[in-house]
Image: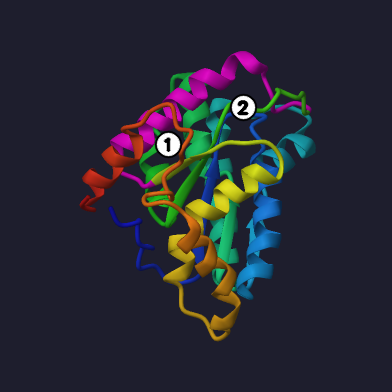
Amino acid sequence: MSAPSAPDRAGGLRIAIVGAESTGKSTLAQALCARLADETGLRCTHVTEHLRDWCAAAGRTPRADEQFAIARAQAQAVQAAAQTHQIVLCDTTPLMTAIYSALLFGDHSLFEFALEQQRLCALTLLTALDLPWVADGLQRDGPHVQTPVDRLLRSTLIEAGLPWSLISGQGEARTEAALSALTPLLLARSGPRQGLFTRLEQRQQAMPEQAWFCQNCDVPECEHASLRRSGHQA
């Protein structure tokens, strides 16, 4: 089976990082950004979560009627970064806002906009629930919300036919898993300094067939289902 190809979109290659709270999204985005810049020589950046800054400034979590503005601001930040960088790691996307709006407020109105933005991403990395939950200010509710968020994320990505890979592991192993998932996309990306892709090529050659799929996914049909719906063939 072939790996998902990057969408034909203007600007940089967008990689979405989504997942339930306290699953290492920000840490992964920062680590990936540094590694990709080093291994490819491309201009890389990561866009931080707008909700975190919003909560810090407001001193509270947002109301239902404030959710769309937060989702839109996140999308605008990603769009701006994509105009000046070749690879953009999105530390959450509007899809996370839509997920929480649905679960907390019963509001499903943000999904259309969120999925429109998610389709601009070449691949979605879903962080697994294998890290200990850690409190982090206003925006975290508790470990009890992780499973419902994860479940709705998976079903939404599958139903939308979006390519995604589950990223698990501790520390450096988590970063390596993400790099393995991204390698097919990066090798297809042209750039002025192709010699810097040598390590990525070696990584690809060393991986077993279909290794860009997450090997630890507990929903084995997930990537296969999403690929069939997006037109890729086994």
The residue that appears at 41% across and 45% down in the rendered structure is 213
- Which numbered disc, 2 or 1, marks the residue that appears first in the sequence? 1
The residue that appears at 63% across and 64% down in the rendered structure is 36
Residue 73 visible in the shown view = no
Q: Where residue 28 appears, x then y in whole percent? A: 66, 46
Secondary structure beneath label 2:
loop
Segment tinted magenta in the rendering: 137-163
Residue at the limit of the structure toward the top, as seen here:
144
At label 1, the amino acid type is: Leu
Within-10-Å neighbours for mark 2: few <14, some 14–19, many 20+: few
Image color mode: rainbow
At label 2, the amino acid type is: Asp
The residue indicated by pointer 2 is 130
Q: Where residue 19 appears, x then y in whole percent? A: 55, 34
Q: Nearer the viewer, residue 98 or 150?
A: 150
Above-or-below relation of 120 to 80: above
Q: Nearer the viewer, residue 169 or 14?
A: 169
Residue 139 inside the magenta-drawn segment: yes
Above-or-below relation of 67 to 102: below
**Quarter occupied by residue 42:** bottom right
Within-10-Å neighbours for mark 1: few <14, some 14–19, many 20+: many
Residue 141 lies left or right of residue 228; in this view the side is right
The residue indicated by pointer 1 is 110
Q: Nearer the viewer, residue 138 or 226?
A: 226
Residue 84 inside the magenta-drawn segment: no
Q: Give the CA separation, mark 2 to mark 1.
A: 28 Å
